[in-house]
Amino acid sequence: MEQALDRRKFLSLVGLGSLSLFFTPYAAWAAEKPPIAGALLLARIKTPPFRDSVVLLFEHGKQGSTGLIVNKPGHRSLGRMMARMNVPFKDRAIFDRYAQSEVLYGGPVGRDRVLSIIHTPPGKWAPSWDLGFLAITRAPELLENLAAGTAEVKQVVACLGISSWAPGQLHGEIAAGHWQVVYPQPEALLDLLFETPACDRLDRARELPEGLPVSVPRHTI
């Protein structure tokens, strides 16, 4: 009896509302959408290299997660980078087209060697991650086809470096409140990636209409 009175006394002193301090974080974590390939991660973390980042997640599974930061200019030219890689261009017009295409900072891992191309429509190059309405490709053959004018792609965004997480790491960061997960509608995502200036993508991403995943992405090896 005395213990029951002590409990009542405790609750009357701290107030039932104060218990929300203990339970609110867990409710918020449970409400957060899980990360899936094709989702956007909007950074809530305030420290580099991910501060103010918009990440396009293209791989998520038991082996970890991989994505590309898509809103940070890398101050490099895709055409000039291809030229330094000795990729032969068909003509000056094609070189000029890609010389005006900026290579974004894709993430802190592999910044000196991992060049990824986000493009529509998906193709048959490998390795490539097919999200249904766009793909992320790292194949040298794609660069050669772009330079030759035979790639048959409509839109291209290049990223140098990737963002990666060990198994379970991204779930932990989302639970800690470091990322907001967004499932963008396909048309809205294409507009964000190919029509919106990189410096405006974070603000634009916060207002994107959301939908459900359109398809299960496939990794072509």
Image: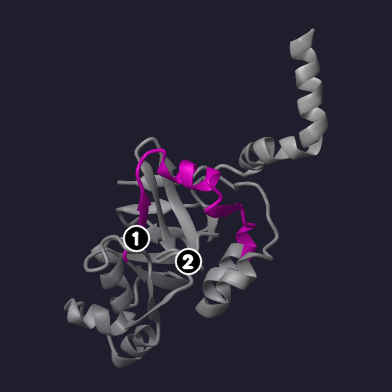
- Position of 168 relative to 192 (above/below): above
Instruction: Sort mark 1 into few (<14), some (14-19) or many (20+) by Cα contacts within 10 Å.
Output: many
Residue 162 is covered by the magenta coloring: yes
The percent coordinates of residue 15 (x first, y second) are: 80, 35
Q: How far apart are marks 1 and 2 (CA)?
A: 15 Å
The percent coordinates of residue 152 (x first, y second) are: 41, 69
Could you tell me which quadrant the N terminus lies in? top right
Which amino acid lies under the numbered mark 2 shown in the image of this protein? Answer: Arg
Q: Is mark 1 on a helix, strand or loop?
A: loop
Which amino acid lies under the numbered mark 1 shown in the image of this protein? Answer: Ile
Q: Give the range drawn in magenta.
A: 161-188
Q: Nearer the viewer, residue 133 or 169?
A: 169
> Would you say 186 lies left or right of 217 here?
right
User: Label for residue 162?
Assistant: 1
The percent coordinates of residue 92 (x first, y second) are: 30, 92
- Residue that carries the numbered disc 2 in the rendered image: 51
Of pointers 1 and 2, the one earlier in the residue sequence:
2
